[in-house]
Image (cartoon, rainbow, N blue to C red):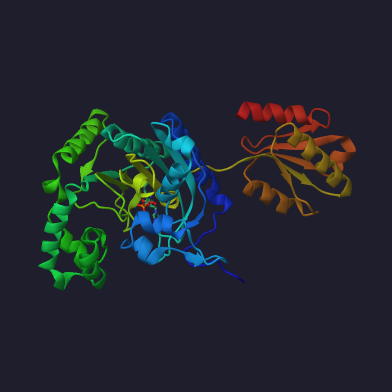
Amino acid sequence: MISKPPGIEDIFPDSIEQWNYIIRTAREVFRLFNIREIIIPILEFTEVFARSIGDETDIVSKEMFTFEDRGGRSLTLRPEGTASVVRAYVENGDYNRLSSCKLFYIGPMFRAERPQKGRLRQFNQFGAELFGSAHPFSDFEAIACMDLIAKRVGIHNYTLLINSIGCTECRPKFIEKLTQYYRAHTAQLCSDCLRRLEKNPLRILDCKTETCVQLKGSAPPISEFLCQSCMVHHRELKNILVENSIAFTESPHLVRGLDYYTRTTFEFVTGEGSQNAFAAGGRYDNLVELFGGKPTPAVGFAAGIERILLLLNNQLHLNPTLDVYIVHSGDVAFIEARKLTMKLRECGISVDMEAESKGFRSQFKKADRENAQIVIIIGEEEIENAKYSVKNMISGLQETISRESIIEHVKQTIRTKK
Ligand code: HAM
């Protein structure tokens, strides 16, 4: 048997109904916010991610699936969607000429993380990127959009964490203080953070090592260093959230694992396990320029579909149903069953049947497993009398219906059920 690589999952029909429900809900909410779909490539030049996410982040330094193509160019399986959307936005003049532009994407992302529950190497995200406005209302729209999706899919008891990590004006002062703080505590830092202290001290706040997490508790909060305009921006975002009854908790050390953020960062978390963020995002006002575009403020978020599925697993029961299952016995009945199957399908009724001669019992079992609403039985007796036995699996009622009226009868039964 050839198995799948670690951290990569198959998604079988049992969870596909929930999967599609989550995506349908997200798409519907994106429509409400006038956010339009973009399909971005799964493979990009490595530079797209290295430049934007940052060399010192875990994603770029240890988690990317990177390889050389035959021409010796370095390609990477996308670890996230933001960098690709920005690359596409800058590359396509029609879109970046628009004063504002709101895009969403859905698809697989790849990170070589240590696999565990809720942490995969191939996982799926839906996300949105809103270009063109520096106003906190735009940050609010990104947060409110994710909040509505969470509520509509039925996630309860989550917390929205927010923070501002300032801008290029005010952050250097904070980083100076942060460096001083960590220099005084190097004995408690992990080896990765000792390196980060020299190269990118902000990343220490994102470290998951126990001693580093403990140290973070007493680290200086960035809120004390924000410049006037970052402070006003953050205050205004909080006002808009309050105005619209979206509850939040301030999280003064929330920096997120990607280097491109400016000002707002946020996460939607639940109390369960260490992989507790099911969605996250923030503002990235310098990224479009970094990709060679004209300076364009932007904000966005992404959610992990598998993490949402884990949260909903015990709550959401969406059993797929089949309208009709045809049970047949004998060669003539087999032919008759095949013809009836196709006639019903042409009328828009979902039908299935066994493609080989099998016992009644095993066929009834299959009908049960497929959650069939009606079972039509065609055996020798039914052929002889030109009548079918029809069992309504919901009411348990069994009737005999003539061959001529069977399609009408099925249509009627399905219609009354719906
Ligand atoms: P992120 O926090 O790296 O942000 O990922 C967003 C979400 O993707 C996480 O909250 C989590 O639900 C899911 N996720 C991430 N890694 C894994 C994994 N290994 N296994 C399963 N699920 C995972 C971003 O990706 C940013 N691009 C978000 C953003 C958009 N910021 C601005 N715009």
Answer left or right for 380 relative to 71: right
> 359 or 3: nearer the eye?
3
Answer left or right for 74 relative to 59: right
Tell me if residue 316 can be seen.
Answer: no
Q: Report which quarter residue 139 is drawn in.
A: top left
> 354 or 18: nearer the eye?
18
Q: Residue at x 43, y 63 (%)?
A: 64
Q: Report which quarter residue 296 is drawn in.
A: top left
The percent position of residue 268, horizontal first and vertical second, equals 31, 46
> 52 or 109: nearer the eye?
52
367 versus 385 height, above or below: below
291 versus 213 height, above or below: above
Answer left or right for 38 relative to 119: right
Q: Residue at x 38, y 67 (%)?
A: 62
The percent position of residue 36, horizontal first and vertical second, equals 47, 35
Tell me if residue 398 can be seen.
Answer: yes
The percent position of residue 131, horizontal first and vertical second, equals 37, 37
Q: Residue at x 69, y 26 (%)?
A: 412
> 195 or 70: nearer the eye?
70
